[in-house]
Image (cartoon, helix red, strand yellow):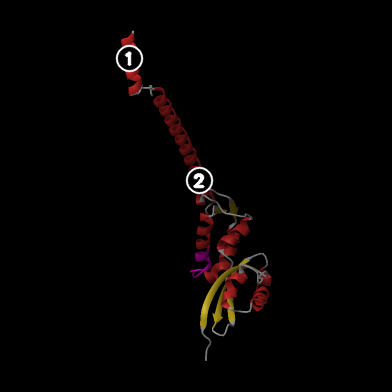
Amino acid sequence: MAKEVVKKIKLQIPAGKATPAPPVGTVLGPAGINLGDFCSKFNDATRDKMGDIVPCEISIYDDRSFDFVLKTAPAGFLLKKAAKINKGSKKGANEIVATISKKDLQAIAEEKLPDLNAYDVESAMNIIAGTARNMGIAVEGLNDAELAEQAKEAAEEEKEQAKRDAELAELEAEAKEMAEATNVEVPVHGDEEEAETEKETE
């Protein structure tokens, strides 16, 4: 009788560095599998990928046994590694933070091909190039000139917007000053009566 899969868990773990401590233990502990056994098998299977983040899909069976399938590292991780940066652009394609070569792009596409919805390396390269673009990473000879122009236009637009915001703030400040200057103090009703009494006694 075939064993029944009762749960599937996806994790992203540094290659060769799985330990029963959190986050691995936190996620897999409640599933009741042998954490030491999992960590040992995962580390052995990923030792050649040291330095990479490896996605892993773990199938847990009704008898608490398990097996797992390793996936390729996330595209974003591979792009940052190739570009030698720690994070992508906060402004997406409107800010270039790094440039990679077409050769780098192809290498990442070839590595990711098994996990991508692509039939060939060229299609995979287009997908990875799109991810790179959204991270502010240009590809030399492919879209670097286009992205540089886009980033330049975005910077100019940002500068113009900042100028408009400053002018608006200045106008608001002037309007506030004028309002304060024309705000003449009006005597309250009691003060008016007091003034009239003083006049009569004179």
Say which residue appears at 48% left-offset and 37% top-offset: 162
Q: Residues within 10 Å of mark 1 (few under 14, many from 20)?
A: few
The boundaries of the magenta stretch are 116-124
Say which residue appears at 56% left-offset and 63% top-offset: 75
User: Which one is in front, 156 or 3?
Assistant: 3
- The tag on residue 162 is none
Q: Quadrant of residue 43?
A: bottom right
The C terminus, quarter of image: top left
Q: Position of residue 79 (x, y in %)?
A: 59, 59
User: Which one is in front, 200 or 163?
Assistant: 200
Q: What's the amino acid at mark 1?
A: Thr
Q: Position of residue 40 (x, y in %)?
A: 68, 76
Residue underneath mark 2:
149
Residue 93, compared with residue 34, is above or below; it is above
Look at the image and tell me whether residue 8 can be seen: yes
Q: Quadrant of residue 20?
A: bottom right
User: Which one is in front, 69 or 40?
Assistant: 40
Could you tell me which secondary element the residue under label 1 belongs to?
A: helix
Judged left or right of residue 114, residue 181 is left
Residue underneath mark 1:
197
Mark nearer the viewer, 1 or 2 = 1
Residue 69, compared with residue 110, is above or below; it is below
Residue 187, compared with residue 14, is above or below; it is above
The question of residue 114 being in magenta is answered with: no
